[in-house]
Each structure stands twice: as structure tokens, then as C-alpha cells.
Image: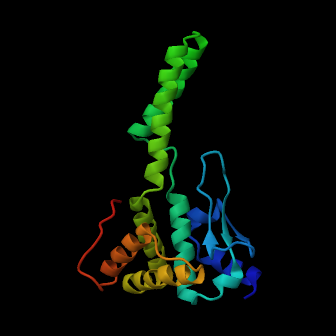
């Protein structure tokens, strides 16, 4: 597989929201088929690393859905959206500055602790099973615009999860098992569903 040609093809199927910040990078030395670092708020660019030697073992639909899923996950991580935890983080940071300017060590510790708790909560929300299920749903929605049916897209995502685990010589983790169950329900292969909140 020629990485440059495949990279151009993948860039074409990517949603417009991903093209602005996501870059596909060839990384033949990595053991994973596809990988991306958790996007931190100060990083404008969000690279996706692909081992194209391993990538070539997947079918084209599996590759399409896997990339769309990764893009959906990366663009779904939101550090700055209006909710209670972002408000608490901002208030905590302001309180730290005020307490620090007043040379109040107890106030700095309390405000700093409050800020740390809020940041930890934001981090956990963005790395939860719910965010993983939402990434699958987002990938399926974009796949519908690329000519896939919902059932086909779910089936390709469902088959790629154990395929990647086999290529990477590992077993499925708990989150992957939850994702498989949810994708089976979307594909009509199971009546048991794991609901994700949108």
C-alpha cells in the first residue's frame, strides 16, 4: 500500500470539520494500526498516526470506518464548551489568581484543588465509554454521507474491532466489548443495546 495515495484518499473521505485540524502521519514503527494522542486544549493540530503496513491488512470499508471513527473521537473532545465543569474550572482559576495576589496560601490551595477536580472531571468525560460510543455514532453518520448504509457501516466497525486486536496481538478490552455490543444492536444483530447520549 502506497501511504501517500492512501493518505489522500482518507483525507477526501474525512468530514470538513476534521480537515481543518487533523493530519494523517505515517508511523511504520508503531505497534498499533492507528493511534492518536489525547488532544490537549493548547494543541491546534491533532495528528492521527497510521502504520500503513498493518493498515493494509484491513478491507477498504474497514479502513474508511476506522478513520471516520478516529476523526469523530478527536473532533468530539471538547475542552471549552459551556457546562458546569468548565464553569467551575474557570472560577477556580480566577480564584487561584485572586488568592495568589492576596498572598493567601490556604485560599490558593483550596482554589487550586477545586480547579484540579474540575479539570480531572472534564478529562474523564472525554475518555469515557460514552465518548467512545458517541465516536462510533459520529463515524456512522459521516459514513452515511459517503455512500454506506447504517447497517453496513455498523458491521464494518464491528468487524474491525476484533481484527485490529488480532493484528496487534492482544485481547479486546472492556470498552471495545461495550462498543461491539452497541454496534451489534445498530447492525440489527442483537436486541440488547448500549445507549449512548448525544
Q: Is residue 195 above or below residue 143?
A: above
Q: Nearer the viewer, residue 90 or 115?
A: 115
User: In the picture, residue 50 is in which quadrant?
Assistant: bottom right
Residue 72's x, y, as percent?
A: 51, 65
Residue 13's x, y, as percent?
A: 59, 77
Q: Is residue 57 left or right of residue 175?
A: right
* Quadrant position of the C terminus in the picture: bottom left
Q: Residue at x 54, y 59 (%)?
A: 75
Residue 11's x, y, as percent?
A: 65, 74
Q: Is residue 41 above or below residue 31?
A: above
* Quadrant position of the N terminus in the picture: bottom right
- Which scheme is used to colour this image of the protein? rainbow
Q: Is residue 188 left or right of residue 3?
A: left
Residue 73's x, y, as percent?
A: 51, 63
Count of number-bearing discs: 0
Q: Residue at x 54, y 73 (%)?
A: 68
Q: Nearer the viewer, residue 151 or 55?
A: 55
Q: Residue at x 47, y 22 (%)?
A: 110
Amino acid at each position: 500500500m502506497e501511504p501517500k495515495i492512501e493518505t489522500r484518499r482518507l483525507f477526501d473521505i474525512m468530514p470538513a470539520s476534521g480537515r481543518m485540524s487533523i493530519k494523517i502521519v505515517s508511523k511504520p514503527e508503531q505497534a498499533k494500526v492507528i493511534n492518536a494522542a489525547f488532544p490537549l486544549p493548547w494543541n491546534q493540530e491533532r495528528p492521527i498516526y497510521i502504520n500503513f503496513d498493518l493498515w493494509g491488512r484491513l478491507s477498504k470499508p474497514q479502513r474508511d470506518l476506522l478513520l471516520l471513527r478516529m476523526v469523530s473521537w478527536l473532533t468530539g473532545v471538547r475542552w471549552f464548551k459551556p457546562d458546569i465543569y468548565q464553569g467551575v474550572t474557570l472560577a477556580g482559576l480566577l480564584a487561584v489568581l485572586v488568592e495568589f495576589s492576596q498572598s493567601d496560601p490556604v485560599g490558593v490551595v483550596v482554589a487550586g484543588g477545586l480547579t484540579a477536580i474540575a479539570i480531572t472531571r472534564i478529562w474523564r468525560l472525554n475518555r469515557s465509554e460514552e465518548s467512545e460510543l458517541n465516536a462510533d455514532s459520529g463515524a456512522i453518520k459521516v459514513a452515511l454521507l459517503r455512500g454506506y448504509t447504517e447497517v453496513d457501516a455498523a458491521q464494518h466497525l464491528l468487524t474491525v474491532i476484533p481484527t485490529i486486536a488480532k493484528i496487534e496481538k492482544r485481547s479486546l478490552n472492556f470498552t471495545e466489548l461495550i462498543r461491539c455490543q452497541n454496534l451489534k444492536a445498530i447492525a440489527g444483530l442483537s436486541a440488547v443495546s448500549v445507549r449512548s447520549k448525544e
